[in-house]
Image (cartoon, helix red, strand yellow):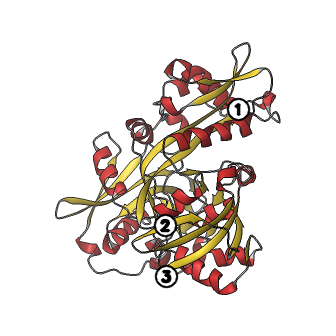
Amino acid sequence: MTHLPAGYRAVDLDPSRHADVVGLDTWAFPSSVDDDVLLGLPSPLTWERARGVQTDDGELVAVHASYPFSRFPVPGARVPVAGLTWVGVHPAHRRRGLLRAMIHDHVARSLARGEAVSALYAAEPAIYGRFGYGVAAYDVRLTVPRTAALRPVPGADQVRVRLERVEERHDQIVQALHEAVDRPGWATRETPELRAAYLDDPPAFRNGAEALRIAVAERDGRPVGYAFFRRKSDWGAAGPRGTVRVRDLVAEDPAVARALWGVLLDLDLMATTEAWVTQDDALLHLLVDLRATEPRLTDNVWVRLLDVPAALAARRYSTDVDVVLEVRDDLVPANSGRWRLEGGADGAVVTPVDRSPDLVLDVRELGAAYLGGPSLASLAAAGLVTAQRPAALARAATAFGWPVPPGCSWVF
């Protein structure tokens, strides 16, 4: 790991350092849960991708890791992506360049594995933009009152919804349905460690709610959708005021979505349902009164292009495009320069050129537009993309766009 100050050195991490990693994590992210409880939980880490920084006397003071997303969906394709995660620095060792050194290390190791793209969820939005990550997807947070009416969908009454406690047997159902979703940014829990950790339900993290439940939707005996949820009981002067918390809902078709939401929004003793959904989720259209949910937009997946030409060539484009991009990248100098992108629905070719650019932008904005979410035109309207040729901006913005908005249903 380069760029480390004197007194620090990089180390590979393995399960023997689990206690050190957990201890550091609770310093970086304060927790009310004791370390010994956390150590008893399944670790989601792929240890060969975990790295740390320790002092000369052996104290672990910084850590980062990544998840191997070998089939990460991007517009029109699936590509290997490094899911940056578990990034933390001990508060007594901040402002010394440890984070920057770890980001350099993550980039170098990801490129060596052939991963041209990195993705993450940001604990603090102000941090990752300076390392070239852009907000590539947004989600919508809702609090739906139980009285909320939904529009009817033909066939919904033919879908059976079973409500069950989450058990290990649900793993196969969830994995198959989740991986079948074709949405840019929709990372699937590919490793056994991630899958085991996701289904684990320690009481310490329930925040006063019940054990995790699952709604399994079936048609003709075949699973066609699911949703994880839990209820938290509460009572007011007027009666029950419980809350349903929904996470990670997947439905094969509109009728399944209507059946699942119809059950989740009408559970006894509950007053509201809290959920976060993609920008095009069926619920946003099914609700007769969206305003009553007080929707809130927030950032979802962040994307960083590690190898600009490889990443741009890996995805597909909504229309034919021939554009020269001048890219700035202070962290990865090989990405800086002018790149001619010639692409379309069947693929793309990216080559370095000397001619004048059509668009000038930072790698951060290129990452933001990569999954087909934020438009290059909207980024230009904010002054973040400079269009030397306005007509080229319109063509490029259309080509980079995608019919399905990006998003991921779980935080990695």
The residue under label 3 is 288
Marking on residue 204 = none
Residue type pointed to by label 1: Thr
Please name whichever residue, 181 or 169, is drawn nearer the observer in this view of the structure: 181
* The residue positioned farthest toward the bottom in the image shown: 391
Q: In front: 218, or 74? A: 74
Residue 184: horizontal and vertical position, in percent? Answer: 47, 63
Residues tagged 1 and 3 counted as in contact (Cβ below 8 A): no
Quickly name the residue at label 1. Answer: 2
381 relative to 165, above or below: below
Residue at which label 2 appears = 349
Give the position of the N terminus as an image quadrant: top right
Residue 81 image offset from top left, x and y in percent: 49, 50
Local secondary structure at mark 1: loop
Q: Name the residue: 37% across, 56% down.
A: 178
Density class for disc 3 (Cα within 10 Å; few <14, some 14-19, many ≥20) is few
The reply to whether residue 207 is visible in this rendering is no
Q: Nearer the viewer, mark 1 or mark 3?
A: 1
Q: Residue at x 49, y 82 (%)?
A: 288
Mark 2 or 1, nearer chain start: 1
Q: CA distance from mark 2 to mark 1?
A: 32 Å
Of labels 3 and 2, earlier in sequence is 3
* Secondary structure category for the residue under label 3: loop
Q: Residue at x 60, y 40 (%)?
A: 108
Secondary structure at badge 2 equals strand
Which of the two residues, 164 or 279, is positioned nearer the viewer here?
279
